[in-house]
Image (cartoon, rainbow, N blue to C red):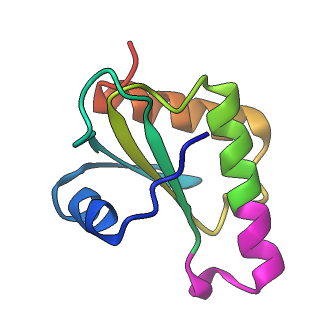
Amino acid sequence: MRTLTAHTDIDRLFAGGRRVAHPALLVLGAPSTEGPHVPGRVMFGAGKRLGGAVFRNRSKRVMREAMRRAGGPYPGWDLALIARARTGASPEKELDKALDTALTTLGVQR
């Protein structure tokens, strides 16, 4: 899975990307600057206000697995999944449904 690491790309995504919020996670998406046929990139984030490192790392692991189950990353898209307070404790089905709804709303998948 390709990760989004360049600060310029992350800043572009946060400034101009579309956002879809759910109590379990926040998803930001924008077409990739690399083109539509290049494998997509994903960023997983969890802010310090969520709690300690153990909780934040678990939240990112859970989001990473949800993205794998959803079939991502998607060609031509840069995505950011941001953890919320419920992310680490959410059941798989809830997280999968939230991610699926967000990706459909963004136009990443049909």
| 50 is within the stretch colored magenta | yes
| 2 is within the stretch colored magenta | no
- Determine whether 29 is above or below 76 in the image: below
The x, y position of residue 59, in whole percent, is: 71, 62
- Determine whether 54 is above or below 64 in the image: below
Point 26% across, 67% down: residue: 8
The x, y position of residue 53, in whole percent, is: 77, 82
> In the image shown, does 33 or 106 lie closer to the viewer?
33
Q: Which residues are magenta?
A: 47-59
Magenta stretch mostly in which secondary structure? helix
The x, y position of residue 97, in whole percent, is: 59, 30
- Determine whether 48 is above or below 106 in the image: below
Picture quadrant where residue 54 is located: bottom right
Q: Is residue 85 left or right of residue 20?
A: right
Picture quadrant where residue 25 is located: bottom right
Picture quadrant where residue 104 is located: top left
> In the image shown, does 35 or 80 lie closer to the viewer?
35
Q: Is residue 80 left or right of residue 2?
A: left
> In the image shown, does 90 or 69 lie closer to the viewer?
69
